[in-house]
Image (cartoon, grey):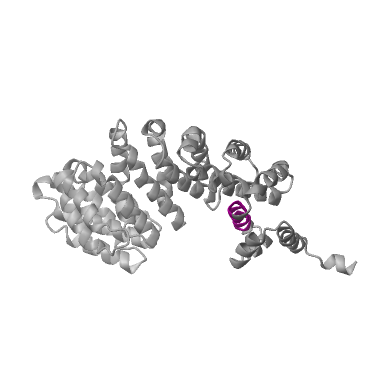
Amino acid sequence: MKLLASLNPSSVAIEAVRVLLERANCQKVLEAIEEEDMINNLKELDKLPDGITAIAKELVEYNPEYVGKIMACLNPSLASLYESQRIVVVAFFAELINQKCGGDMSMVEMIVNNLLGRLVDANHIVRMLCIRGLGNIASAGEDQVQKYCTTVLSAMMAGMDDKEDPEDNITLESMSGLSRILTQIDESSIRPILVNITLRIRPCFEKQRASVRAAAFMLFGNLSHFGDGPSRAPFLEQIHTNFVSVLLHLNDEDVEVRKSCKHALRQFGPLLGSTSINEMFQKHLIVDGNLNYGEFMYDLTKVIIADFIQKINFFVMGNISFFRSTWPEIRSNAAIFVGFLLGNLPKAQHSLITKDHVCGALTLLLKDPVPSVRIKAAEAMSLLFEY
């Protein structure tokens, strides 16, 4: 009895998997997952999907003849009462699509239907893995993408609306999946939902989790592929609406967010209708390069004033809304952006700005608890001496 009490079901199951792989002559699979220590991921629920994904990947590579039989064995467990079992199945199925089902594309339809059926699962990890699997259609080839694009796009949109996603994992998978699929679908497929997608991702620009912000800006940039046709006018409006946010996060505290913002600006630069702004984006916003944010913004505001004078007050008010940002860096960026816009604005156009509101907002920012923010607010106010 003491021996039974000391047994760990997870360890016993993992050992069984190891022995099974040996007996089935899947030695290369076992060596691959042990070399990467993926077998130990099976012990913890939060790492379980990674472990199963690794096993699926190696099985497809070294023993694809077993994939169909394993699918048949796993399929009934999709309706299991145990969450861990459903997680195992959807993680395995998701990776199979990523690996093109070992060349047997006849499996794709069954897997897609099974994943769609679990999008309403009570467990958020299962829902996230379903979204990941559907996004992996991007790896299955152009024919499969075209076949399932409408279904997958609908699933991704639903994923971004998931209300029980406390850590934004489902949202992150949805945006990452969309970014992958967008490179392979026609403009006509995305046109009806293009603006809707931009509206859905806009709140993600200000999420606390950096990876979510980065994925949102990356997706926004990728949507530019569809902004130069019949959708140009509505998408251009979305660019202007989110222009300030992208420029402020160009100096985000997280390096991946900064890279995503550079990517986005370079992508939609040609759509702005300003040769000068586009040239600045293409010349200075090298994704892996270093950017002197202050100098860049000072020069950029001059071009914005020259080419978008009618939108200056709109951009100024957009910046002021970021004075309440939770990040000191963004509050600082917004302050100096406003300062450069107003400081470079010709006297003849001063009437375009609601000066009292701007000065009042900057005065409040002088009381910010973070010294670096107060410094930028003071610097911005020093540029307003002609008002």
Q: In this rendered view, identify the residue nearer to me: 354 or 330.
A: 330
Among the 4 quarters of the image, the one containing residue 68: top right
Estimate the x, y position of residue 250 in percent, counting from the top left. Answer: 31, 57
Q: Does the magenta stretch include residue 50?
A: yes
Among the 4 quarters of the image, the one containing residue 81: top right
Estimate the x, y position of residue 285 in percent, counting from the top left. Answer: 27, 57
Estimate the x, y position of residue 202 in percent, counting from the top left. Answer: 40, 45
The furthest residue to the right? 1
Q: Does the magenta stretch include residue 17?
A: no
Specify the principal SS of the magenta part.
Answer: helix
Judged left or right of residue 30, residue 351 is left
Q: In this rendered view, identify the residue nearer to me: 249 or 367.
A: 249
Q: Can residue 164 be seen in this view?
A: no
Residue range (magenta): 49-61
Judged left or right of residue 340, residue 82 is right
Q: Residue at x 27, y 67 (%)?
A: 375
Q: Can residue 313 be seen in this view?
A: yes
Q: In this rendered view, identify the residue nearer to me: 113 or 173.
A: 113
**Is 236 situated above or below 94?**
above
Judged left or right of residue 116, residue 312 is left
Q: Which residue is drawn at 21% across and 56% down?
A: 283
Estimate the x, y position of residue 302 in percent, counting from the top left. Answer: 15, 52
